[in-house]
Amino acid sequence: MFRSIRSRLWLSYALLIVSALLVVTVSVVFYLVSNPLELRQAKQKLNIVQELLLATRDEWGNLPANRLEREFRRRAKNLNVRIFVLDEKRQVLIDSGRNENPPIEFKRLTRLIQTVYDDANTPWLYNWETLGNNQVLVVATERPRVAALNLVSDELLPPLLFGGGAALVLALFLAYGLARWVADPLQQMVSAAKRFPEQGAKPLPVEGPQEVRELLAAFNQMQARVETSQRSQKEFVANVSHELKTPLTSVQGFAQAILDGTAETPEAQKNAAQIIYDEAGRMHRLVLALLDLARLDAGMLEIRRAPLDLQALANRMVEKFGPQASAAGLTLLADCPALPPTPADGDRLAQVLGNLLENAIKFTPAGGLITLGGQVKDGGVELWVQDSGIGIAEKDLPHIFERFYQADPARARGKKQGAGLGLAIAHEIIRAHSGKMSVRSLPGKGSQFVIWLPGADPDASTLIRKKK
Ligand code: ADP
């Protein structure tokens, strides 16, 4: 009962209407009961009668008391008033209504209130004037009274009931309309939330009052975010399964060949074992990369930032990858001047540069040149790895840092096959350093991967990366 917005709105309207009607009724009744119009009319009548009596004083002024009372009774009856004559002690000498009405005692005569009660407690309005001989002429009439209850039941109740009923019906419609305005979008949201997650759920129409519109907009945003995250999660699982399926199939196949004797010769057996070894290595690398990504996603990969000599790091990396480059017939050079100490995690940065150098070696034909360079830039430092390799097509460039993205994997055939995770991890690591990573490339001419790292920040020495 009265739990929905609709019924509460209607209830508050109804209460408001009833209380407004009550206030109006009480004030109208109060006004009518005090009855200023009839009161004024009665007072006017008293004034006129008094004037009349005073003007015709010579007609009755000299009459003896008993005849005077008779004369006043006659006049009072015609004029519908009660006429008194009081002596100097305010004792009643003459009372025209002595026989019909209870007696009245005039203790004090005032000009202000001019109401007196008879012995039966009936209020009388009066007007008085002195008559020269210390006597006082008083003209009185019963104070007009209105019966409050009769007034309410006869005059006020029918229009009040009609008006109140009409207002309540109107309130019902108003409350219904208003409640629908507020509650319908909320109801839609409830149904959408119950149906969620639903394939291809449309955003809810943003309508209703301001607060509800904001809520709907926030709900739509949340729904879109959850959908995106669900989609990328599904893609991620599909990609991981796909990447594991290929090496597992070949491991299984070649192990089977050794077991059932299909690989008969020692050479064939060695070849099968080599493939099993390579594929196991590929799976191992994939699992390590996935672990790194999971830690980065969970904000659990610790980035220990310490002032780093980047020139020394660049030289070390060139030294480390020198033999690999030479074996591929490539020239690998360091072109890094002395750079200001930059807060970074040395191991993680070496991982990123290693990945870039490995890619450069993988995608540069023999005879090419690879350079690892650096410079001071925009309040930080820049490191880059440039190669004269096959480059990256323009359509692939925007996706190159996405997980599992491989621009035409066939290009790496014959080389150590990756899973398209290296650049995604490198990108995340640089982001965890509050840095930026970008790529420029021309197909056939070569690629340049650029890392920018912010300069020394006096506060930060160790930073645990929190997911944004
Ligand atoms: P993978 O481990 O498969 O190499 P990466 O994330 O490191 O994955 O790279 C993603 C893709 O970007 C690669 O498949 C490759 O097509 C392209 N790529 C990366 N580096 C280069 C480069 N130096 N030259 C040309 N293509 C590159």
Image (spheres, rainbow, N blue to C red):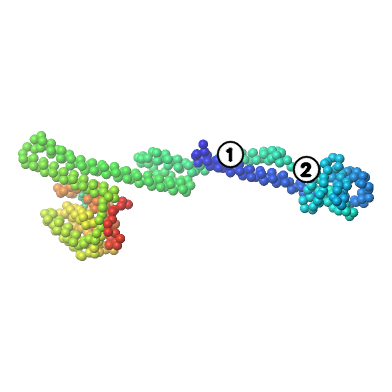
Q: Residues within 10 Å of mark 2 (few under 14, many from 20)?
A: few
Q: Is residue 141 left or right of residue 277?
A: right
Residue 21 picture location, percent across and down: 63, 43
Q: Is mark 1 within 8 Å of ligand 1?
A: no
Residue 431 picture location, percent across and down: 28, 54
The amino acid pointed to by label 2 is Asn
Rendered residue at 47%/41% (across/down): 184
Q: Residues within 10 Å of mark 1 (few under 14, many from 20)?
A: some
Total marks in image: 2
Residue at disc 2, secondary structure: loop
Rendered residue at 36%/39% (across/down): 198
Query: Which residue is disc 2 drawn over?
Result: 121
Q: Is residue 134 left or right of residue 112?
A: right
Q: Is residue 372 left or right of residue 223?
A: left
Query: Which residue is disc 1 drawn over?
Result: 169
Q: Is residue 99 visible?
A: yes
Rendered residue at 19%/59% (across/down): 313
Rendered image quadrant of residue 268: top left
Rendered image quadrant of residue 318: bottom left
Disc 2 vs disc 1: which is toward the camera? 2
Which is nearer the eye, 232 or 59? Answer: 59
Residue 74 picture location, percent across and down: 89, 43
Q: Is residue 51 visible?
A: no
Q: Is mark 2 within 8 Å of ligand 1?
A: no
Marks 2 and 1 in Cβ contact (< 8 Å): no
Along the polypeptide, which appears first: circle 2 or circle 1? Answer: 2
Residue at disc 1, secondary structure: helix
Relative to 424, residue 376 above or below: below
Relative to 462, residue 154 above or below: above
The amino acid pointed to by label 1 is Val
